[in-house]
Image (cartoon, helix red, strand yellow):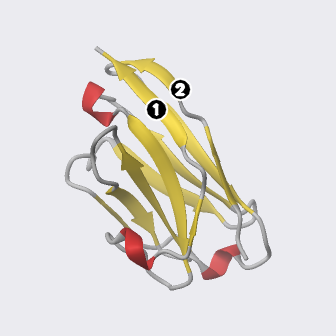
């Protein structure tokens, strides 16, 4: 069992930055690929970024490529999402997810555990 707790969300102006954190419980964090997803009101949950269990491989949604960066610290059981050049369309609840696999995925259905989400609001 893995429990995930996100933090770092908030209100920021367009062009600003935020760093989200996701702290995981358990001793097997390094066995899990991690992903970040987001869901805006009235929209489906969408993929944002993912990182392999070692941290050696990352990939991003086209909409955030070049602006967001995912990273992890396995010693701290934490995954991060650095978000720069934020836009109003980035406004959503952001969720981290864990997948017991070496690689992350674009598909939210393959993840095994989810956090409760953290709200990010970008004002124009």
Q: Quadrant of residue 7?
A: top right
Q: Residue at x 50, y 34 (%)?
A: 119
Say if residue 57 shows up in the picture: yes
Name the residue carrying label 1. Answer: 120
Q: Is residue 50 left or right of residue 65?
A: right
Residue 65 horizontal/vertical position (percent): 26, 50
Q: Residue at x 55, y 40 (%)?
A: 118
Q: Quadrant of residue 59?
A: bottom left
**Is disc 2 placed on a helix, strand or loop?**
strand
Check the picture and name the quadrant holding the C terminus. Answer: top left
Q: Residues within 10 Å of mark 2 (few under 14, many from 20)?
A: some
- Picture layout, residue 69 above or below residue 106: above
User: Residue pushed farthest bottom?
Assistant: 101
Name the residue carrying label 2. Answer: 10
Specify which label sits upstream in the sequence, 1 or 2: 2
Check the picture and name the quadrant holding the N terminus. Answer: bottom right
Q: Report, in whole angstroms, how far the alpha carbon at label 1 lies from the one at label 2.
A: 5 Å
Asked whether the residues under the numbered discs 1 and 2 touch, taking CB atoms below 8 Å apart as contact, a structural biologist would say: yes
Q: Is residue 52 left or right of residue 124?
A: right
Q: Residue at x 51, y 85 (%)?
A: 101
How many marks are shown on the rendered structure?
Answer: 2
Q: Quadrant of residue 20?
A: top right
Q: Residue at x 20, y 53 (%)?
A: 62
Residue 117 horizontal/vertical position (percent): 55, 46
Say if residue 54 shows up in the picture: no
User: Residue pushed farthest left?
Assistant: 62
Residue 109 horizontal/vertical position (percent): 40, 74
């Amino acid at each position: 069992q893995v429990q995930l707790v996100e933090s770092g969300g908030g209100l920021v102006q367009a062009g600003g930055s935020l760093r989200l954190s996701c702290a995981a419980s358990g001793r097997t964090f390094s066995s899990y690929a991690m992903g970040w997803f987001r869901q805006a009101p009235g929209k489906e949950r969408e993929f944002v970024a993912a990182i392999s269990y070692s941290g050696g491989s990352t990939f991003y949604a086209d909409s955030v490529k070049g602006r967001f960066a995912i990273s992890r610290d396995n010693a701290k059981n934490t995954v991060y999402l650095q978000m720069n050049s934020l836009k109003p369309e980035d406004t959503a609840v952001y969720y981290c997810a864990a997948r017991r696999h070496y690689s992350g995925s674009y598909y939210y259905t393959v993840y095994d555990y989810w956090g409760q989400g953290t709200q990010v609001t970008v004002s124009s």
